[in-house]
Image (cartoon, helix red, strand yellow):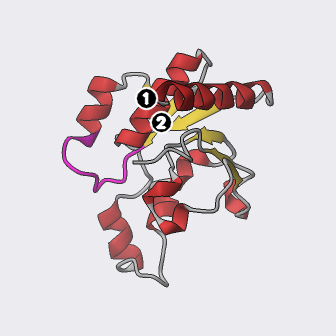
């Protein structure tokens, strides 16, 4: 069973590769789902660019983990740290949401990005497609690709 879902994910990755001549990217959060997506991408043999968006408040050891285990992953630095943003914009709230956009999502602008998103993670992640077109104007047509979307815990 595990081999079957692995092969299905790799075939999906290859299908995405064949469907575009654009460069492909992988967002690496330093977590387990990003790790498996990176492994699947490597196993597929496609060329892709991996990146990690430093939020400036990630758990201690995250950047070291990326450098030691994913030397091919570029570590992107935000224009402002979380603390600078809080000083300028106030604490983030349900109605004052800016953190993800300014500290995580800027890495995907205008790109096709493989990500380790699974529907089993939360009810908010259920009901998505395996490829999500980001319709927010500032995202400039980015597409989020989820090769392990149907994987369970």
How far across and down, in percent of the image, does residue 107 sit? 54, 46
Q: Which residue is mark 1?
A: 73
Is 4 situated above or below 31? above
Q: Which residue is mark 2?
A: 51
In the image, taking residue 12 as reference, residue 30 lies left or right, namely: left
How far across and down, in percent of the image, does residue 114 sit? 58, 38
Residue visible at 36% across and 53% down in the picture: 55
In the image, taking residue 51 as reference, residue 10 lies left or right, namely: right
Q: Is residue 8 visible?
A: yes
- Residue span colored magenta: 53-62
Tell me the element at label 2: strand
| 1 and 2 marks in contact (CB < 8 Å) | yes
Name the residue at the front extreme. 1
CA neighbours of label 1 inside 10 A, class few (<14), some (14 to 19), many (20+) = some
Residue visible at 37% across and 25% down in the picture: 70
Q: Quadrant of residue 18?
A: top right
């Amino acid at each position: 069973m595990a081999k079957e879902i692995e092969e299905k994910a790799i075939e999906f990755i290859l299908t995405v590769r064949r469907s575009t001549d654009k460069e492909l990217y992988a967002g690496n959060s330093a977590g387990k789902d990003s790790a498996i997506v990176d492994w699947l991408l490597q196993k597929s043999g496609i060329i892709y660019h991996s990146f990690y968006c430093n939020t400036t408040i990630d758990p201690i050891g995250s950047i070291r983990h990326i450098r030691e285990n994913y030397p091919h992953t570029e570590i992107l630095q935000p224009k402002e740290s979380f603390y600078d943003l809080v000083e300028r914009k106030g604490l983030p709230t349900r109605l004052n949401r800016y953190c993800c956009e300014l500290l995580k999502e800027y890495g995907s602008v205008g790109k096709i990005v493989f990500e380790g998103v699974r529907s089993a993670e939360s009810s908010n992640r259920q009901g998505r497609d395996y490829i999500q077109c980001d319709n927010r104007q500032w995202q400039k047509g980015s597409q989020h690709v989820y090769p392990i979307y149907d994987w369970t815990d």
